[in-house]
Image: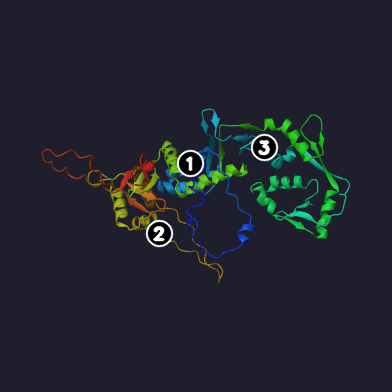
Amino acid sequence: SGPGGPRRDGPGGPRRDGPGGPRSGPFRGSRDRDEPRREPPAPLPDFDVNLMPEEKGVEGLARQIKLTGRAYPIFDIAHLILKKPDRFTITFSVIKTGDTVAAPLFLCSLDDTLWLSEAEVTAHLLNRHFNTFYSTEKIAGDAPKGTYTFVAQCGMSGLVLGPPNYHDYQTKLHKLHTERFARMPFEAFKARVKIVRDEAVVKQWVEESSFKTEFTALNVPEPLKFNTRAEVEAHFKATHLPNLFKSVASHTLLGANVGQSSPVIRRIFNLVVEDQVRFPLKLVNTLCTQFSRHGLQFFKVNKTITHVSVARPTYLDMEATPVSPNLRRLIECIDATPKCTRRKILEVLAPAPTVIAIPAPVEGQPATPPAAPEPTAEQSAINSDLHWLIHQGHVIEFANGLIETAKRPLPKPAPQPKPAGAPKPDRAPRVERRYVPAFLGVPLLVGE
């Protein structure tokens, strides 16, 4: 696939007016100029992205189709798979032109996530797995010197960051963004910070700042202590990072596990899934290949909707092929019953005996509902015959329970006598059938 999703032509669509032309709507003065401009999203890096059904899930679906014998619309199965990310995998591969890579790809081996740079991996590990490598301890210290009448506070988390001119304000601001709001552009996050003049909030910051944080390295031969986050990050990069990530050319993730990876990887993933939800042709082609390995067959109903089943529809000519009276009676019942189902067949050919409800033991209480009756010998025989007909393709039971027989193919038209010297036709006339094998035709669904 392309670089993660569909491309859009042009930055903003057609203009309503030509240069210098009239503007529609009221004039707003300087209000629009005062509002912060929204930066367009950065262009996505180029990766080859391939979405595949999860192999064990396909194996389970194939087993169910064989067990029930029902015919399922292949596009419905594709949409069913796309509804839950744990039902498919997605592979990201770098694109190379000679020795040049369009965009690098890094794998964090600690939690099987994908990232676009070493800096992203470092920030992720220190955010998600900090306690694996370092312990944190608060130690009482001196209160901030000076008088403060206001502090900055994050409008989303409520965290008090301190006065904007305090020495560690920028460090706290960037740390909060990295750890909790990395999905937002930094400037948009910064715009949500507000100035608070409440004495109680200022006092809260002073009390919190009266403690200093000390970090201790874990899982190292000798305990090391650090006073700042920057010292911790430098130690982490030198000691642990080289063993926790590597550059990869390709990697496959389960769809449900993409959520912890880089925001750009998640964005590409969402675009690819949305594209397949709109029209899952590529996923359908893959499903056909996987189902065919399990021995399943494909056909189209009315030359439009592709189905997968245990057998292709095969017309049973009872005039030319000897069949038992029971099979003949079953096929005639299916043909004669509108919107035929398995229940209707049994009601016509082998109705269940009447079940009498057990009387209520206490007056005023409902009678005990009768237990589901066991199928009679005649019903079991009909189900067995129906199973054989379905697996031979003479009868189709669809996913919604409707049952019908495979229809007789229309006869080929008789060849017309050719006048002398007439040119040969470009192609032979097509044979019109209700059911058409569809495996090779699936890629041509668009425009058919």
Instruction: Spot the residue most to the bottom.
Output: 364
Q: Earlier in the sequence, mark 1 or mark 3?
A: 1
Q: Position of residue 116 (x, y in %)?
A: 61, 37
Nearest the viewer among 94 and 88 is 94
**Residue ID for mark 2:** 353
| Cβ–Cβ under 8 Å for marks 3 and 2 | no
| Cβ–Cβ under 8 Å for marks 1 and 3 | no
Element carrying mark 2: loop
Tell me how far mark 3 sits from mark 2, CA to CA.
74 Å
**Residue ID for mark 3:** 119
In the rendered structure, which amino acid carries the disc numbered 1? Val
Instruction: Spot the residue most to the left.
Output: 420
Q: Does residue 270 appear to the left or right of 204 in the view shown?
A: left
**Residue ID for mark 1:** 58
Q: Earlier in the sequence, mark 1 or mark 2?
A: 1
Tell me how far mark 1 sits from mark 2, CA to CA.
40 Å
Mark 1 or mark 3, which is nearer to you?
3
In the rendered structure, which amino acid carries the disc numbered 3? Ala
Q: Position of residue 389 (x, y in %)?
A: 34, 46
